[in-house]
Image (tube, helix red, strand yellow):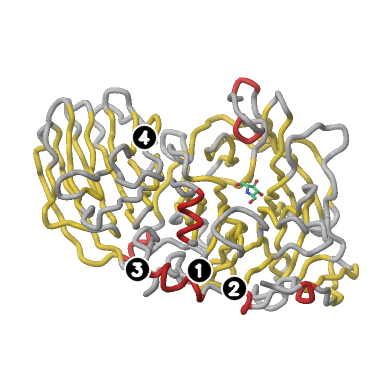
Amino acid sequence: MASRRDFLTLSTATVLGGRIALWSDTGIRPEHVKTEPLQEKLAADPQRPRYHLMPPANWMNDPNGPLLSKGQYHMFYQYNPNGAFWGTMHWGHAVSPDMVHWKHLPIALAPTPGGPDKDGCFSGCAVIDQGTPTLVYTGVSPEVQCTARSADGMVTWRKYTGNPVIGAPPQGMEITGFRDPCVWREGDEWFLAIGSGIKGQGGMVLLYRSKDLIHWDYLHLLCKGRRDELLPGEDAVSTGEMWECPDFFPLADKHALIVSTQGAVIYSLGAYVNHYFRPEVQGKADLGNIYYAARSMADENGRRILWGWVREGRGDTAQRAAGWSGVMSLPRVLTLGRDGTLGMAPAPEIAALRGKHQRFEGLLIVPGSLSLLKSVRGDSLEIQAEFEPGASEAVGLAVRSAPDGEEQTSITYNRSNGHLLVERERSSLSPDVDRGTQGGAFALAQDEKLKLQVFLDASVIEIFANDRACLTSRIYPSRSDSLGIGVFARGHNARLKALDVWEMRPISANRLTT
Ligand code: DQQ
């Protein structure tokens, strides 16, 4: 733990936009990231993923400020160094040459006692301002916007001594929240979108403008939710009266707004005119309830890459006992789909992890029994499968199947009602895990084949369907032999056109992902 002394201010003067501004040391040193007592336990934990980014230990949630700079991908994330539970939010930090292999860096931001972020450094973003890496984030409580900069290539960060840079929401609004800034550049000006909402009316995004990332003027609402989109719920986020983590960016000839609310990541594609966003098409970036708080970044090839927090699907006690909680999703490349919806595909860089490969072709799938692919076993696999559903009611893949089927998880395309599902009733014999079916609407066109790309990584499942739907899930099989893969159909025959499976190489020797 950092001592109070570590947080004491060490101020230096920095020239910013012609004025003198002060930036203070956050006091974080590399040695403060300590995981030694847990390392053996984490390395031996069969539920801990081997090729997804996670902190060395403890809790993580939202991705913050993913950024490509000088050929390195930087990922920050909400991090609690005190254990595998939410609280005392810091910004963890990792860096990668390829979005696949990571090195952990010192914690970037920690709450400053007595400062505007004394109760937590909540989510935000990262930009490069005339060569200087700059973080913009929410300090609590109350929710205000703060900034920090790095002068040493993003190893350590200095907070602006004038924080908060936005100290209160616009006057006269009874808002449900004021957090998670997203900043972008237009010409010689910066724009900033903040997640917010109004009780009984819906979520909204507030738009600000600045010349220097310090002095911000409120402009107006970038976009506003609708009353008829609200759900019954306990708090403003679950009802949809608060939009968290707005992410706003151009995509082909449209603009995209992504917000997290009601347990889901919702995207809108539409027109951005005179600094107002008018949504035209809406959908879910993920059909489950495990993927949340997504944030995107642009890379040097003009690709737009989305990252999300993969939550746990088991109780708090199990998470604390494990000593870790939360996983970063694999990177997804976003495109504007031919049908006008959001196209999503795994970043091709992930293929660098592919090891031993097997291929199966032309298999008739008869309802009633599971066709296990006998030579394939594993909990660290990429599977690509192409199905002709025919007249079947449902078709899909069984994964993490015990030889006798006692534990088994089904990835199912339900043809009758056009849904993509993960059926988890038999996923685990453990009592303290989520069992519900997850998924949502995903329809194939007449005669369109079902193309599934599935990433299994211990307790994580990430599914991409026909490059336009995603479904992320968590399962915690208890049997060490729950490693089988199979195909099934319900109602009538279906056909497996081809299935490719690769064993995936771990990104570290000890599940510490560094
Ligand atoms: N998580 C952060 C907030 C954000 C929420 C706090 C979304 O900034 O609104 O950890 O998961």
Asked whether 288 or 71 is in front, the reply is 288
Whole-angstrom CA distance, mark 3 to mark 2, is 22 Å
x then y, percent, for residue 20: 90, 70
- Proximity of marks 3 and 4: CB atoms separated by less than 8 Å: no
Give the number of the disc on residue 56.
1
Label whose residue precedes the other's in the sequence (1 or 3): 1
Amino acid at circle 4? Thr
Q: Nearer the viewer, mark 3 or mark 2?
A: 2
Residue 470 seen in the figure: no
Crowding around mark 3 (Cα neighbors within 10 Å: few <14, some 14 to 19, many 20+) is: some
Q: Secondary structure at mark 1?
A: loop
The residue indicated by pointer 3 is 506
268 lies above or below 331:
above
Label whose residue precedes the other's in the sequence (3 or 4): 4
Label whose residue precedes the other's in the sequence (4 or 2): 2
The residue indicated by pointer 4 is 437
Amino acid at circle 3? Pro
- Proximity of marks 1 and 3: CB atoms separated by less than 8 Å: no
